[in-house]
Amino acid sequence: MLLHIMSLCLNFLQIQMNGGISPYPFNSLHSRNSTELRNAEDPESSVSDCESSVSGAGSDSTGLFTNGFNRVDEKDTAHGVIMHRFTSCLDRVRERTRVIAIHRRIWSSFTAQAKLQAFQIYFRALANKNDGNANLKYAWFGTSKHGVNRIMTHGFGDEDIRMNSGLFGLGVYLSSYDSPLESVQSSTVDEDGLRHVLLCRVLLGKTELLSPGSSQSNPTSDEFDSGVDDLLSPKKYIFWIANMNAQILPEYVLSFRAAPCLGGSLRIETPIKLPTSPWMSFPALMNALSRLLPSHVVTLINKYHMDFKEKRISRLELIRQVRRLAGDKLLIAVIKSRRGKGLKAPTE
């Protein structure tokens, strides 16, 4: 009965990018998926094929993702289309990158259905606001294995928000379908040496150009719905905190392996030691960073430090979060400056 009701609702909510109702029947959605991936920038592509896996059960023999996902078979056309787009846009690092698995999100749970329908409702709202054009695109988001599970369960949150290190203001950054390298560089290596990027549906609506170094955290007016780094050929999409989970719908996760020797092109998460020696304690580091970073970033770092002290996260995770929020360049500069002054750490 529940699946029947869901089917009726989903058929009703099948929406095309021009704001109309999709003529495709529910049972044909799966077959249309690969075509839409090929033509992701085509304004006639539809949001509705997300439901193609609504009746599946989550299973994955690889052990990568076992809850809420189905592994996409390598013979599936969608697998080939996604892998080709991902690897062909990696430029010179393409030959050193190997796709291990692609997983498709399952929409059968109550919460997944709620998120899907909320996305579709917001699609209609943006289409009505912007003369029938919700500006639906595919986009990539680089994260960790833990990040994939967290985002799929709880949505995007504080850990996914970037400020200044992203250069274009406070928000969630995704890279365009043709620029996966932007997201690859923000992914982190897991315990098996794999990286993970999400392939998401995004609702850009009307975009505004953001300038490098911006501290913007909201649209400049109600006219705009998201930000970009370039109006004609954007590589970065910036979504503001207030509506980020309404405008971003993760649909696939692509897991891949990249050669460590690629260095800066594909940044491997190598440890940078937080100072613990007598010349600089963590409170001393925070004292210095508090004068250089926005207050909300300092608050986040303090939160992770407290989580570490209470053994809710590991030291490695604390270091990773401090690096992500403050940036390696700033951390190194602060540490070198402190060392050069030969100052002693304040008493904890």
Image (cartoon, rainbow, N blue to C red):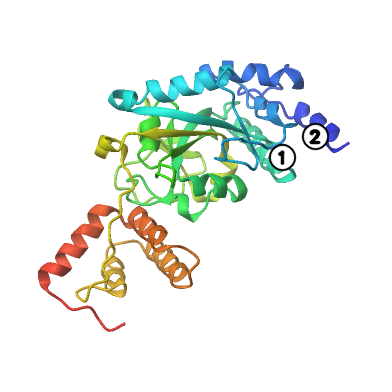
Q: Does 8 sit above or below residue 301?
A: above
Label 2 sits on residue = 6
119 or 67: nearer the viewer: 67
Q: Does 154 sit above or below residue 205?
A: below
Are the residues flagged by discs 2 and 1 in contact, CB closer than 8 Å? yes
347 or 59: nearer the viewer: 59
* Picture quadrant where residue 321 is located: bottom left
Say which amino acid is labelled 2: Met
Residue 121 horizontal side relative to residue 210, left or right: right
Mark 2 / mark 1, whichever is N-terminal: 2
Residue 244 horizontal side relative to residue 191, left or right: right
Residue 223 horizontal side relative to residue 25, left or right: left
> Is residue 20 at all visible to an observer of this figure?
yes
Instruction: Locate residue 72, reporting x and y percent.
Output: 59, 26
Label 1 sits on residue = 113
Q: Which mark is residue 298?
A: none
Mark 2 crowdedness (10 Å alpha carbons): few <14, some 14-19, many ≥20: some
The quarter of the picture where the N terminus appears is top right
Instruction: Locate residue 14, reporting x and y percent.
Output: 71, 26
